[in-house]
Image (cartoon, grey):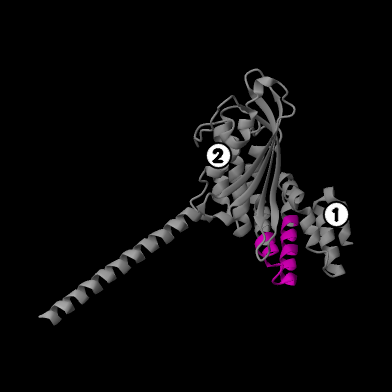
């Protein structure tokens, strides 16, 4: 009887131990999954600067609210359905220069957006996009909030949303061929909503170097060669450069050929100018250590497409 009781006690203790282990394992797994969830991040990491030196009136002493308002809006908005880790977030800088203001708090501003992409197998990053928009007018009064509504025009949210979708489109295009198409459709929708408002910078009439012209060209099949070249240059060129330099350089050369062919078949130059303004130094650097005949071929390609940076390309001769 005593032996049976002892056996029962041991079995009970074993069961309790197993339950404790199971409970501990469950708690541990919950903690792990919680840590993973916490580690997930928004897609964009923005840095916003605001230059208000041209606005001298003391009536606008609240302008220091503008930088954190826009920065937090970008960083806390969920832009995609994809999962990002903290170190995968896309870096984007916004430089806002306030140029003028009227008595109603309507500001004229210049906006510069620059985004970056990591280069695989390195610790460096590459500028992916640089856009200068000198035609932004918005109302900003004390304690204003940004309210996002995809079907309503807002003179701050709509402009920021538009350019963040363009940033995402360029980034996704650089990792998979035409991978940013869904974001371009989002940007196109914003243009359609904004045009009905009559706000500046969205018109399809007049200059083609505005928000409407940008997304119109990016969604035009005739300009797909630019987007395909962005993929080939980054994913098959830069990302592979430290692994197989010769093959990566050949892919970069083929990307330039694709750009040249697309340029010859189209009339608008806005997308080309945006690309070369961000990449001309890199294009040169990719061929500096190549054999002379390859350098000269690259030189001829580059100067044929971009005569604004010939002094840089001359290094290849």
Which quadrant would the N terminus be assigned to in this image?
bottom left
Residue 301 occupies quadrant? bottom right
Q: Is residue 219 visible?
A: no
Q: Is residue 63 left or right of residue 196?
A: right
Contact between labelled residues 1 and 2, with CB atoms less than 8 Å apart:
no
Mark 2 crowd level (few <14, some 14–19, many ≥20, 10 Å Cα): some
* Residue 178 in picture, x, y percent from top left: 60, 55
Q: Disc 1 designates what residue?
A: 312
Q: Residue at x 43, y 56 (%)?
A: 34
Gap in Å between the C-alphas at discs 2 and 1? 38 Å
Residue 24 occupies quadrant? bottom left
Q: Is residue 63 left or right of residue 270?
A: left
Q: Residue at x 76, y 48 (%)?
A: 277
Q: What range of the chain is rendered magenta?
A: 233-260
Q: Is residue 253 magenta?
A: yes
Mark with earlier residue (2, 1): 2
* Residue 110 in picture, x, y percent from top left: 71, 34
Q: Under tag 1, what secondary structure?
A: helix
Q: Disc 2 designates what residue?
A: 73
Mark 1 crowd level (few <14, some 14–19, many ≥20, 10 Å Cα): some
Farthest residue in the top direction? 103
* Residue 215 in picture, x, y percent from top left: 62, 43
Q: Residue at x 59, y 54 (%)?
A: 172
Q: Under tag 2, what secondary structure?
A: helix
Q: Is residue 249 magenta?
A: yes
Q: Is residue 198 above or below residue 189?
A: above
Q: Magenta stretch mostly in which secondary structure? A: helix
Question: Considering depth in this image, is 13 or 19 the residue closer to the camera?
Answer: 13
Indicate which disc residue 163 carries.
Answer: none
Q: Is residue 133 above or below residue 280?
A: above
Q: Is residue 270 left or right of residue 104?
A: right
Q: Is residue 62 visible?
A: yes
């Amino acid at each position: 009887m005593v032996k049976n009781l002892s056996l029962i006690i041991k079995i009970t203790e074993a069961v309790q131990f197993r339950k404790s282990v199971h409970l501990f394992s469950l708690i541990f797994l919950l903690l792990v999954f919680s840590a993973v969830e916490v580690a997930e991040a928004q897609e964009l990491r923005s840095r916003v600067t605001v230059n208000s030196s041209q606005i001298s009136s003391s009536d606008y002493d609240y302008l220091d609210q503008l930088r954190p308002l826009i920065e937090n809006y970008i960083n806390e908005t969920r832009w995609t359905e994809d999962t990002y880790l903290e170190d995968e977030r896309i870096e984007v800088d916004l430089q806002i220069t306030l140029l003028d203001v009227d008595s109603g708090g309507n500001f004229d501003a210049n906006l510069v957006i620059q985004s970056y992409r990591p280069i695989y197998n390195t610790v460096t990053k590459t500028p992916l996009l640089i856009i200068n928009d000198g035609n932004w007018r918005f109302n900003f009064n004390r304690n204003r909030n940004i309210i996002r509504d995809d079907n309503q025009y807002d003179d701050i949210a709509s402009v920021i949303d538009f350019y963040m979708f363009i940033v995402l489109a360029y980034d996704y295009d650089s990792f998979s061929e035409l991978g940013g198409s869904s974001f371009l459709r989002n940007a196109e929708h914003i243009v359609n909503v904004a045009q009905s408002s009559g706000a500046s910078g969205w018109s399809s009439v007049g200059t083609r170097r505005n928000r409407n012209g940008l997304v119109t060209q990016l969604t035009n099949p005739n300009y797909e060669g630019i987007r395909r070249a962005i993929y080939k240059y980054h994913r098959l060129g830069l990302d592979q450069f430290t692994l197989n330099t010769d093959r990566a350089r050949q892919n970069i050369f083929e990307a330039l050929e694709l750009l040249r062919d697309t340029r010859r078949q189209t009339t608008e130059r806005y997308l080309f100018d945006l690309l070369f303004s961000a990449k001309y130094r890199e294009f040169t650097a990719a061929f500096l250590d190549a054999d002379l005949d390859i350098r000269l071929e690259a030189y001829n390609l580059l100067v044929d497409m971009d005569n604004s940076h010939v002094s840089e390309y001359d290094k290849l001769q």
